[in-house]
Amino acid sequence: MKRFKRAIALAVVLVLLAAGVCHAQSASIISPASSGIASADSLLVSVKVTDQRTVRVMVFQEMEQDAQGKLKAVDVSKFEASDMTRIRSEYTSTAAVTFSFTNASGAAVKPTVGSVYGNFGITNKYTDVVYTAPAEYTSTGDVGFYTKQFSSVTPGLYRVQVEILKADGSVESGITSFTAIKEKAEEKTTDNIFASQQTGALQFLQNLLISILK
């Protein structure tokens, strides 16, 4: 049984790596898959950390303005892979990626849930809104994993940001990954022994990875 579980774990990691991983020298975002699309009501964030480094992990929800100028969730119901590629490209080319929160004077400030981080995209279409408070994790071995699942996630466009910190707490570098969460599909009853209460291959892999890392 243990051998079988280890084999599954290896297969999961390989599949996730094949699906797309954002990485820097000392950290990589294993989940969500880079520019991925999932039908779910939860979000699994998993970051691999090496070299006994400390990282700061944050999740943003991307918002856009409605006709009255108020922020609303991005409608991802019709998003395809090409849309995610476009968004990633717009973010890379237009965002002022500083990987740190500072006030007008340049002093570091602690971000709060719901606060606005910045804008990106053509005509600054998308607005970064803090979805989760920052969490720091330090790997005490050669390899460590920060893993957290967020439940009751509503449909929309999300961005995971990982900051690699120096010994003094300042930011050395950072990586980011986008994911689109569509409304969870209605569950169907099936006699297949591999049936899952979650729909979609990615959601199955996410839940399996959680059980392995516990």
Image (cartoon, grey):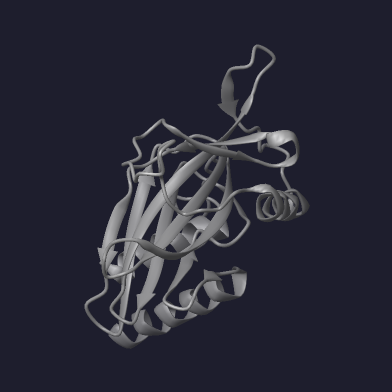
Q: Find the residue positioned furthest to the left.
A: 140
Q: Is residue 125 above or below residue 22?
A: above
Left or right: 121 with respect to 144? right
When asked about the image quadrant of residue 120, the answer is top right
When asked about the image quadrant of residue 50, the answer is bottom left
Name the quadrant of the C terminus: bottom left
Confirm whether residue 131 shows in the render.
Answer: yes
Residue at position x 26%, y 74% in the image: 139
Left or right: 46 with respect to 65? left
**In the foreground, 204 or 139:** 139
Residue at position x 47%, y 76% in the image: 13
Q: Is residue 73 above or below residue 187?
A: above
Residue at position x 47%, y 43% in the image: 60
Q: Find the residue positioned furthest to the bottom.
A: 3
**In the foreground, 147 or 202:** 147
Q: Is residue 93 above or below residue 155?
A: below
Q: Find the residue positioned furthest to the front.
A: 105
Please give the count of numbered marks on the rendered protein. Answer: 0
Indicate the position of residue 161 as horizontal and vertical percent values. Answer: 47, 55
Indicate the position of residue 196 as horizontal and vertical percent values. Answer: 46, 55
Confirm whether residue 195 shows in the render.
Answer: no
Residue at position x 49%, y 79% in the image: 11
When asked about the image quadrant of residue 162, the answer is bottom left
Q: Is residue 12 above or below residue 184?
A: below
Left or right: 120 with respect to 198? right
Indicate the position of residue 18 as horizontal and vertical percent values. Answer: 60, 75
Indicate the position of residue 195 as horizontal and vertical percent values. Answer: 49, 58
Name the quadrant of the N terminus: bottom left
